[in-house]
Amino acid sequence: MEHKLQLPWRGPLIVVEKQTDSLYLCQDLTTKKILQIPADRMKRYFIDGATDPVEVAAADKDEFPVEAIIDHHCAGAKLATCTFQVRWKNYGPADDSWLPYKEVKQLEALDKYLEAHPNVRLPSK
C-alpha cells in the first residue's frame, strides 16, 4: 500500500520484462531487486551521458556515493571499534563523516584505502 507522502516517482529502474500491458518487472539499480511496477507508475528516464543513473537511484534513497576513505582510527582490538573518515563525492572536506567499520566494510573505497596504505593493520574481527 502506498503512503500518502510517498513520492510519485522512484528510480531510475531497468525494465527487465513486460508481464502485461499494465505491469512490468523492473530492477532497482542500487539493490538489484526485481520489482513489479504498474505501467501507470512509470515514465521514461533519459540518460544525458553526464549523470550516472546509479547515483540518481542512490540519491533517491538518501544514499550518497563515497569518493574515498581518507583516514581511520581504531580504539581497541576489534574491528567494531574502528571508524573511517569518508569523503563524499561532490562534497568537500567540511562534509566528511566518520563511519563505523560495519558501514564501510563493503565499500570499494575501503579496498582502495587499504591498497594505498599497505602498512595499515586493522584489528581482527
Image (tube, grey):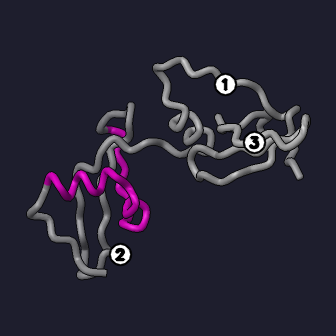
Residue at the spot of label 1 = 45
Q: Which mark is residue 10?
A: none
Could you tell whether 72 is left or right of 95 in the image? left
Residue 103 magenta-highlighted: yes
- Depth check, mark 2 against mark 1: the one in front is 1
What segment carries the magenta color?
94-116
Q: What's the residue type where badge 2 is placed?
A: Ala
Residue at image coords 70%, 42%: 16
Q: Is residue 124 above or below residue 82?
A: below
Label 2, residues with CA under 10 Å away: few <14, some 14-19, many ≥20: some
Q: State the CA–CA distance, disc 3 to disc 2.
A: 42 Å
Please name the residue that numbered disc 2 is placed on: 80
Q: Callout 1: 10 Å neighbours few (<14), some, many (20+)?
A: few
Depth check, mark 3 against mark 2: the one in front is: 3
How would you rate the neighbour count of disc 3 (Cα within 10 Å): few for under 14, some for 14-19, many for 20 or more? few
Relative side of 17 to 48, left or right: right
